Image (spheres, rainbow, N blue to C red):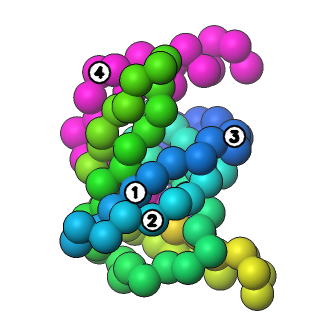
Amino acid sequence: MAERSSYRIPMRLSIRYAENGTSYNGIIKDMSESGMFVLAEQIDHSENSMIKVELPVNNNRLHLTGKLIRIDELNLNKKGFGISIIEPPQEYIDYIEELLRIL
């Protein structure tokens, strides 16, 4: 398995995400400058799907685009997927750096 390129910040943050115009609710389990892992009750997506994420950051909504890179069935009731963020905006990078400072 390849080594991760950046530190993952553990968290529990509710988000909205969409694929092909359909919106879903999820919970971020962990995130980094390059991606995030999202817990979801149902996963109707396939690997390499393009996912739009609406992330609450400092009383605003940050819109990110990512590529679904892996799907995990954690147990019978929990599923999750990893997203690689495509061209993360500076506001997202700043948010991650702020979280790392408080850890």
Say if mark 4 contacts mark 2, CB within 8 Å: no
**Element under label 1?**
strand
Q: Is residue 47 above or below residue 35?
A: below
For the magenta stretch, what is the residue range? 82-103
Instruction: Determine the image quadrant of residue 23.
Output: bottom left
Q: Which comes before the other along the chain, label 3 or label 1?
A: 3
Q: CA distance from mark 4 to mark 2?
A: 25 Å
Nearer to us: label 1 or label 4: 1
Dot 1 and dot 2 residues touching (CB under 8 Å) = yes
Q: Amino acid at mark 3?
A: Met
On residue 90, the disc is 4
Q: CA distance from mark 1 to mark 2?
A: 5 Å
**Tag 3 and tag 2, C-beta contact below 8 Å:** no
Q: Which residue is mark 3?
A: 11
Q: Nearer the viewer, residue 68 or 28?
A: 28
- Name the kind of residue labelled 2 in the image: Tyr
Q: Provide the secondary structure element on which disc 4 rests.
A: helix
Q: What residue did someone put label 2 on? A: 24
10 Å neighbourhood of mark 3: few (<14), some, or many (≥20)?
Answer: few
